[in-house]
Image (cartoon, helix red, strand yellow):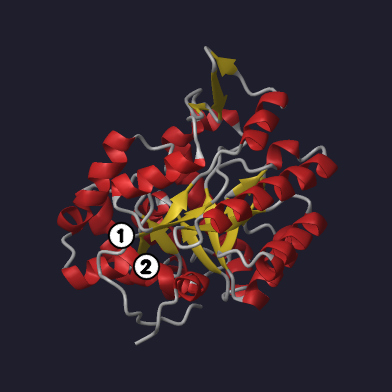
Amino acid sequence: MPVHAHYNIDNNYRIDVHSHPIPDLWRNALIEAGNPVINGTLWNEGFPVPEWTLDGHIASMDDYGLNYSTLSITAPGVSFLSSKPKRAKGLARAPNEQMYEYTQAYPKRLGALCVLPLPNIKDALVEIEYCLDTLHFDGIGLYTNFAGLYLGDRKLDPIFQALNTRRATAFVHPTTPRCQDATLGYPGPLTEYPFDSMRAMENMLLTGQRAVFPNVTMIFPHGGGAMPYLAGRIAGVTTLDALGALSPADTISQLKSYYFDTASAYSAIQLQALKAFGGVGRIVTGTDFPYVPTNQAKPGLDSIKANGGFSADEMARINNGNALSVFPRIGEKLGLMES
């Protein structure tokens, strides 16, 4: 688990752990794979894919009052090529190198989270080594499931072992479950994204994977999805012998061990639930740029303090302190000194 450090940094310095570049090479791969293009707009997982440029990303950060952002490829990463592992491997490497170029163009503004060619374990391990040990990325990007292979599945143990050994931080973006009936025909991001975050955490609990690899720091977006509201129910039901007769205290402790970002979680109900569930020390800033419209994300950022009832010191942790504790490479790049 991360060691919390205190840095000499302005309390209002904002680190966004949840933002997405949309490189042309990835966009084109989605089109080639059969994603629909309607009236010139590409659709992915039931939602329109926004136009994106690097300069526009930096301009939006200035507009939102964001000082530093980590870049990650949004769902489903490259798992739509799971039946073509060689192509998936190449498509993962290309955006990773593209994101590296972005971070070199703006080293004090941008970091990157590696996209992995999962569910191919061997190729993903190579990419972890390349991104973390050669390119020195801030962390890793994961998804709640990879073409139906969920976090928690013990097939993924080699991935978690590699991350656990490095004490790496992983940002876990939800994706649409393969069971289309669950969505009722609506886009997955509407409500299935928050529930898929919960499924992944629940599966890691029930398979024991999270307990085996506790040194992987994990961030779930959108206020942790449904988890803050359903953790108590999970802790109660999993005491049954059929589900492992788990200790309620141990279950709650594990479910509280994750970090949760504020993307699309700006309301008083969501923020106060997060504060009560995991505590201020588990909340990090997220925007989901460019997928969440500016007219929601920008005022949402500005409402966090009031809606969550946070003090100035608590906001400093949400703005930057918690992120710096789980992404120490950001502090190193920025030349921040621990106090």
**Residue type for callout 1:** Leu
Residue 31 percent across, percent down from the top left: 66, 25
Figure quadrant of residue 276: bottom left
Which amino acid, mark 2? Answer: Arg
Question: Residue drawn at (58%, 46%), measured in percent from left and top?
Answer: 73
Residue tagged 2: 282
Q: Which numbered marker is on residue 274? A: 1
Question: In the depicted view, which residue is nearer to us: 239 or 285?
Answer: 285
Nearest to N terminus: mark 1 or mark 2: 1
Q: Position of residue 228 (x, y in %)?
A: 36, 57
Badge 1 marks a residue whose secondary structure is: helix
Where in the figure is residue 45, as x and y percent of width and height?
A: 55, 31
**Marks 1 and 2, how far apart in space?**
8 Å
Structural crowding at the residue carrying mark 1, measured as other residues with C-alpha within 10 Å and reported as few (<14), some (14–19) or many (≥20): many
Q: Determine whether, in the image, residue 17 is placed left or right of residue 311.
A: right
Total numbered labels placed on residues in the image: 2
Q: Tags 1 and 2 in contact by the CB under 8 Å rule?
A: yes
x 60%, y 60%: residue: 140
Q: Nearer the viewer, mark 1 or mark 2?
A: 2
**The C terminus lies in which quarter of the figure?**
bottom left
| Residue at the spot 73% in from the left edge and 42% down from the top edge | 91
